[in-house]
Amino acid sequence: MTQLENLCLWNNSLIAYRGKTMFLRDWVTSDICYVKDLYENNIFLPFHRICERVGHKPTRLFEYGAIRTAIASLFLKMNDNGIQAMKVMDYQKISTFKPRQFRKLMVDAYQTETIAVSFWKRKMGIEINKDIWQIASNASKEVRLRLLHWKITHNIYPTNIILYKMGIAESISCTHCTEETDYIEHFFYYCRKISKVWNLVEEAFFTACSTKKFMLMCGMPYLA
Ligand SMILES: [Zn+2]
C-alpha cells in the first residue's frame, strides 16, 4: 500500500478500466486525486461514503465500480505475491521452469479473492470457501443450473436493481410482490410469493439430507 498510495488516480496508465485511463472531474473537484484518498484506515471507502463526498447521480455506481476494479487490478499486479514472483523470475531463467511449474507460479502469484467473497461475508456472514464454489459443478451437469449458481455466488444475477440501472426494468421493486426492493436474496428467498415454494423445498431437502446417497450426490460429507 505504502508505495502505491501516492499514485495519481487520473490519466494514469497504471490505473485503467478496460484498458483506458480515467478522469472524473467531479471526483477531482471533491479532492479525490490519489489512491490514498479512496482509503480510510486501509479500507476502501464504501459507495455511500463516496456519494457523501462527490454527490449522487445515476452513473455514480458505475464510476465507483470502475475505479474499484482498476485499483483491484493494480494491487493484483503489484501485491506481495506478484512482486515475489517477479523477483523469482529475475534470477531464475524462465527456460529452467517446466510448463506446469511456471503455470503454478503465475497462478499462485495472481490468485486473489473475488469481491463476491467479502460481499456475502458482509451481507450474510457466510464464508464462501472452495467447497461452496464447487457445489454446483459437483451437484449437477446441467450447464444452466451451474451458470445460475455462478451468477448468484458472484452477485451478478440481473435483479431489478441492476436492470433498472440499465433502463430495462421500470423500477427496482420486486416484479412479483411489488412491495420490496428486488435484492438478490429477496428474489430467490424472502419474497412472500416464493417463500411457500421454499418451505416445501426446505422440507424436502432436509428429509433427503438424511440419506447418504443424496449427500454424496451433492458432493457433501455424510455424517451418520
Ligand atoms: Zn417480492
Image (cartoon, helix red, strand yellow):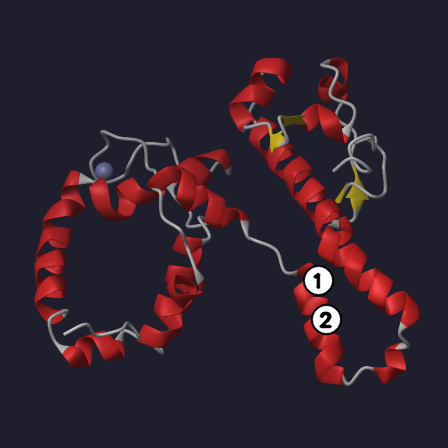
Question: In this rendering, is residue 37 above or below 63?
Answer: above
Q: Image check: 129 left or right of 196?
A: right
Rounded to the nearest angstrom, the CA distance separating label 1 from label 2 is 6 Å
Question: In this rendering, is residue 129 above or below 183?
Answer: below
Tell me the element at label 2.
helix
Question: In this rendering, is residue 105 above or below 78?
Answer: below
Pointer 2 local density, CA inside 10 Å: few below 14, some 14–19, many at least 20: some
Tell me the element at label 1.
helix
Q: Is residue 56 visible?
A: no
At 48% from the left and 49% from the top, the residue drawn is 116
Q: Which residue is mark 1?
A: 109
In depth, the one of 156 and 85 nearer the eye is 85
Q: Amino acid at mark 2?
A: Leu
Question: Mark 1 touching mark 2, by CB under 8 A?
Answer: yes
Image coordinates of residue 159 in percent, x first then y, are: 38, 43
Q: Which residue is mark 2?
A: 105
Image coordinates of residue 104 in percent, x first then y, are: 68, 74
Q: Amino acid at mark 1?
A: Ala
Ligand 1 found in image quarter: top left
